[in-house]
Every structure is written in structure tokens, then in C-alpha cells.
Image (spheres, rainbow, N blue to C red):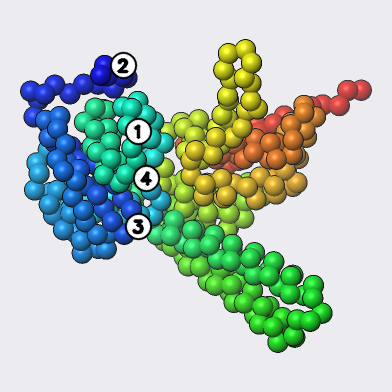
Amino acid sequence: MTPHPLIKTVPESQPALFAGIDVGAEELILVIRKNGKSVDPQKFANPPADRARLVKKLVKLPGLIVCLEATGIYHFDLALALHDAGVLLRVINPKASHNFAKVLMKNSKTDAVDADTLAEYAARMDFVAWTRPTNEKLALRSFARRINALTGQKAAAKNHLHALAASQETPKAVLKDAKLAITQLEKRIDQMTAQALLLIAKHPELNRVLTLLTGIKGIAETSAIALMGELLLLPPGLSHREWVKFAGLDPKAFDSGKSVHKKTRMSKAGNRHIRSALYMPALSAKTHDAHVSAFFQHLIANGKKPLQAVCAVMRKLLHAIHGMLKNDTPFDNTRFYAIPVAAN
């Protein structure tokens, strides 16, 4: 089969050692590719002890390059262990490996096939090393995601209380218990937020970012923590457009020939936590900041639906935050959107 023009061919004479690891919640599948040929897959459990055994095995293979998919929380501990052990590591977007498999015309999808695809990706694509986040940034992300999870539980508890209160048959003791659950969740959210702020206060870089973000109308401390927990772990050196792609806020067009013209939609092929962290600030900013509100109204006047306009505000806020953190400058709402001067 003729190789895809964008995928390099590794000469068979060149000694090369690559590994792909398919990461699951309970199991790790390892495929090692040597001199263009894949070895039979090996299975490891995902608890810390077996992860350590896998790392110990890979450390003994000099020159090895390992490739993982960014699969939420499950790949992260393994990535940290491999990096800290000195193994050459790259972590790729699952969409990249999916598209790579399509180019290779791999029709089957199993854990072993996925691991083999990752090993071949490492062999054929130029190596880009994974950048390890600092411990404080990893801790901040844990706080941010825990706060988000508790906030979701509180919203569900409030909906449940509303349903209970709608029925006259609900005993008062049940309503009291439902209200108690909400109060407890609020206390836990406050405790997690306080701990996150203590962590931020200990690190000048994090404190600087918090100050910049809370300078935007619509971004309070909780939203700032959520944004910091995700944005500060993105690979360094990315452009504002790459940030948008990582967030899945980039537009996805679908046109084919003269007859197929579907509506452009948000791709959502990125970090959903960034989108979630931007949503409420965008709603608040369009209400409380005159320039953001003018931008929103401009989009509505030009035929955008309210949700489309909110997504555009989210995208532009992300652009602004990228520039603020890169240049260490506060938010300038006049640059967000210039309010047209009313004609006399």
C-alpha cells in the first residue's frame, strides 16, 4: 500500500524502537514496534503497582519513544511516571490517532489495534515531547474539577428538591433532608475553593494569573480557578487559535460539491472542561460589560442565534485571556469590541 504523503516512511535498515500504550480505566495495552514490525501486545493492570512494573520495563529499552492518547484522567498518572523515569514520551489528541488510523485504513478497533496505531504514529511522525506540568498546576486542576463535580451535584440536588416540593404528598422530613444535602454541598464547594485559593496564594505565577482573570467582568474566583485548572496545563507556546482548537470552540464547516452545505457548527473536538469554564463567564460578561454586550447584540442583529452568539463570546474571551497571560496585561474591554458611536 502506498503510504500517505504526509506520513513519513521509516527505513527498515534504521534501528528504531517505539511503543504505543492504549490506556483504559483498568487495563494498559502495550505494543512495541521494532524496525518496522510490531511485537505481540502485552497487558498490564492500571493500579499504581502494575503501572510501576510497566515503567520499569520500558526504562530498560534505550532510545524508546512512547506514545499515549490524552484520555482524560486515566493517561495522566502513567504519563507522569514515564516522564519522571526519563522515558521519551509524546501525548497526542485522540482525534489525531483516530484520523491516523483512517489513513492507514485500519478497519478494526480493539485496544490492541489502538496501541499498535499509537506505536506506528510514534514511528512515522516527528517527535514532539510531552511537557510535564508543575505539581502545583496539577493540584489546581484537581481542585477545579472537584469543584465542578460538586457544583454539578448541587444543581442536580436543587432540581430534585424542586420536584419534591411540587408534590403536596412529600413529607416535610424529606424536604428537610433534600435542603440539607444542598447546604452540605455548598459548604464542600466553599471548602474546596478556599483550599484552591490557598494553593494559588503560595505561588506568585498562579496569583498573577488569578488577578488578571478576575479583572474581567463575569469571571469571579470560582470561574478563574476552573479556567486556570485547564488553561495552565495546555502545551506552552500555543497560539490563540490553537487554544480555541484545544477547547473545541473552532467552527466546523461541512461543504461538499455544489449541493451539500450544512450549517457551520462548533467542533467540540477538544477539552470540554474549558468550554464549561467559559460558559458562565460569557453569560455574565455579556450582561455586565458594555463592550461584550455590544458584541453579543451585534451578532444577534446579524442573524446569529443566542447560543451561537454566546459561543462566539466564549471564543473571543479565550482569545483575550491568551493575550493577557502572554503579555501580562489586564483585560481591555475596548479591544474586545468597539461600541459604535451613535449618529447625530
Badge 2 marks a residue whose secondary structure is loop
Question: Residue flagged by tag 2: what amino acid is it?
Answer: Pro
- Nearest the viewer among 222 and 272 is 272
Q: Classify residue 279 as left or right of residue 138.
A: right
Distance from Cα at disc 2 to Cα at disc 3: 35 Å
Q: Are marks 2 and 4 in contact (CB under 8 Å)?
A: no
User: Residue at left 47%, top 53%?
Assistant: 229
User: Residue at left 9%, top 44%?
Assistant: 61
Distance from Cα at disc 1 to Cα at disc 4: 22 Å
Q: Position of residue 39 (x, y in %)?
A: 14, 40
Q: Position of residue 286 (x, y in %)?
A: 72, 43
Distance from Cα at disc 3 to Cα at disc 4: 13 Å
- Nearest the viewer among 283 and 90 is 90
Q: Position of residue 190 (x, y in %)?
A: 57, 69
Is 62 located above or below residue 186 in the figure? above
Q: Classify residue 250 as left or right of residue 8.
A: right
Distance from Cα at disc 1 to Cα at disc 3: 24 Å
- Mark 1 or 4 closer to N-term? 4
**Which numbered disc covers residue 5?**
2
Residue 332 figure quarter: top right
Residue at mark 3: 25
Q: Classify residue 47 as left or right of residue 190.
A: left
Residue at mark 4: 70
- Mark 3 or 4 closer to N-term? 3
Q: Are marks 1 and 4 in contact (CB under 8 Å)?
A: no
Nearer the viewer's eye, disc 3 or disc 4?
A: 3
Residue at mark 1: 107
Question: Residue flagged by tag 4: what amino acid is it?
Answer: Ala
- Mark 2 or 3 closer to N-term? 2
Badge 3 marks a residue whose secondary structure is loop
Nearer the viewer's eye, disc 2 or disc 4?
A: 2
Q: Are marks 2 and 3 in contact (CB under 8 Å)?
A: no
